[in-house]
């Protein structure tokens, strides 16, 4: 079956979303990226089940992911922050052990569309995605521009298709 046929079978529905911002510097008032994610999913008719800000401490981050997995009703976990190269950027190292499958293509395409906008600096992003059980997890940079780019060009257009593939 061709991918266009898959997309037709992937009927859009209302998804339950968890949004987690990993940061040492932002709170809910200053978290532009997290708020943008929440707003975009709400505009699209999805339900924000969880929205949290978690310090970039690996143990706190792991506990948050464990907590979301324990809820068991989240369709998509969208994280932002902690995907760069600094010593405090631990999102990828924390998330990867949870993945049943990693969607390497997500990071590749994200860096490609980022390259079109910002040039070679796109190589500094370690954005990725994967499947934890039936929950799709997408790890985005903390930059508001990067979040907007990823949501508009990649995530929202493929949301129903990703869910369908992960749950069939």
Image (cartoon, helix red, strand yellow):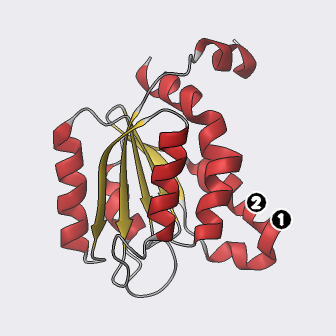
* Closer to the eye: label 1 or 2: 1
- Which residue sits at x=50%, y=22%? 164
Furthest-bottom residue in view? 87
48 w.r.t. 63: above or below: above
Specify whether 86 is left or right of 56. right
- Which residue sits at x=35%, y=31%? 134
3D distance between C-alphas at marks 1 and 2: 7 Å
Identify the residue under disc 1.
116
135 w.r.t. 141: above or below: above
Residue 142, percent across and down? 51, 71
Residue 117, percent across and down? 80, 68
143 w.r.t. 147: above or below: below
| Tag 1 and tag 2, C-beta contact below 8 Å | yes
Residue 77 is tagged as none
Q: Nearer the viewer, residue 87 or 72?
A: 72
Residue 80, percent across and down? 45, 64
Quadrant containing the N terminus in the rendered view: top right
Quadrant containing the C terminus in the rendered view: top left
Identify the residue under disc 2.
112
* Secondary structure under the numbered disc 2 in the rendered image: helix
Specify whether 94 is left or right of 81. left
Quadrant in the picture for residue 79? bottom left
- Which residue sits at x=38%, y=79%? 26
- Which residue sits at x=51%, y=66%? 33
120 w.r.t. 11: above or below: below
Quadrant in the picture for residue 24? bottom left
Q: Residues within 10 Å of mark 2 (few under 14, many from 20)?
A: some
């Amino acid at each position: 079956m061709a991918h266009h046929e898959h997309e037709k079978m992937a009927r859009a529905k209302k998804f339950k979303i968890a949004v987690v911002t990993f940061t040492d510097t932002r709170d809910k008032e200053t978290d532009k990226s997290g708020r943008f994610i929440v707003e975009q999913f709400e505009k699209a008719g999805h339900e924000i089940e969880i929205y949290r800000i978690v310090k970039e401490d690996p143990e706190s981050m792991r506990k948050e992911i464990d907590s979301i997995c324990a809820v068991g009703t989240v369709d998509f976990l969208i994280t932002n922050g902690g995907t760069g190269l600094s010593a405090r950027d631990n999102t990828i190292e924390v998330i990867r052990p949870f993945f049943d499958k990693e969607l390497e293509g997500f990071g590749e395409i994200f860096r490609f569309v980022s390259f079109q906008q910002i040039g070679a600096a796109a190589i500094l992003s370690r954005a990725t995605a994967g499947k934890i059980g039936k929950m799709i997890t997408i790890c985005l940079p903390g930059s508001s521009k990067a979040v907007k780019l990823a949501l508009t060009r990649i995530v929202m257009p493929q949301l129903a298709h990703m869910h369908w593939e992960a749950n069939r």
